[in-house]
Image (cartoon, rainbow, N blue to C red):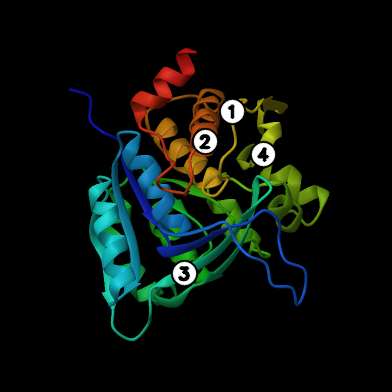
Amino acid sequence: MIEQPKITVVGSLNMDLVTITDQLPERGETLIGQHFQMNPGGKGANQAVAAARLGACTTMIGCVGNDTFGKQLIENLAENGVNVDNVEPVTHSITGTATILVSEEDNRIIVTPGANNEVTVDFIESKRDIIANSDVVVLQLEIPLESVIRAVEIAKENDVKVILNPAPIFELPHSLLKQVDYITPNEHEKKVLIQNEQQEQELQEKLIVTLGEHGVAFYEDGQLVNIPANKVQVVDTTGAGDSFNGALAVALSEGKSLREACIYSSAVAALSITKLGAQTGMPTVEEVNEFLKK
């Protein structure tokens, strides 16, 4: 029997408050929306669900508030096969939220971290054994930066592969970028992340840049490779990048080459945008395999 890859996601859990509208309001303008719904989200939780649905043994490390949203997020992760033993409710902060406006096949998002800020360095240190015994650790930037850095340090001390999804983007220490194995920015995030040509040269083999409808780009043996995007009917792009990152962790932990992993992850991301909602749109391993056959 093949052992399941062990993926640990360290990051955020949010309740997504989604409004769908024909157009976005101008400053001072009020519009009538078409639809509103609440969906489990947070970049960390999204990536954990993506990995779990693709057959990985997935553990989530993070914090929620001791409130209704927190309970719902934990229950949803468990229902999707994610180990939630290391998701801890905190009494002094509310669960994080993301306010999402979906319009014209795109989205705009405002994140309010709440309990995600309680993922402290000490909290990360208390999860050392979980991180150390992973095949791949996935991180984003919706928890404190010092906690991200500590998680990466623990992973690298134990030869665990690290994927850093640098979102929401801000300038990061070069020492952190040098430690991780793969960095997965979109085009905008890459512009903020890479300050000069020398830095891009140093990080070249780590960068996997998602390009939306133009696919994904990375370097292989010094040569730029572009994997075209799959053509699908777009319903909601929320969570596409998270689907890609969760799938990338699974594919790499299964021993796929970087090229194979990016083709697989692109397919997962494409399927995710054919349904409404970040986690609700994420495909199963069976759906992905059927899609790739076609």
Q: Residue at x 59, y 28 (%)?
A: 232
Horizontal relation, residue 286 to residue 107: left or right:
left
Estimate the spatial distance between the alpha carbons at disc 1 and disc 4, rounded to whole Å.
12 Å
- Mark 3–mark 2 distance (CA, rounded to whole Å): 23 Å
Vertically, is 245 above or below 146?
Answer: above
Per the image, the residue denoted by label 1 is 232
Residue at which label 2 appears: 274
Q: Earlier in the sequence, mark 3 or mark 4?
A: 3
* Pick the front one: 230 or 100: 100
For label 3, count other residues whose C-alpha is less than 10 Å away and answer few (under 14), some (14-19) or many (20+).
Answer: many
The dot on residue 212 is: 4
Numbered disc 2: secondary structure: loop
Mark 1 neighbour class, 10 Å CA radius: few under 14, some 14 to 19, many 20 or more: few
Element carrying mark 3:
strand
Q: Position of residue 229 (x, y in %)?
A: 64, 28
Q: At x 39% / y 55%, what residue is drawn?
A: 45
Q: Foreground residue, 56 or 162?
A: 56
Q: Earlier in the sequence, mark 4 or mark 2?
A: 4
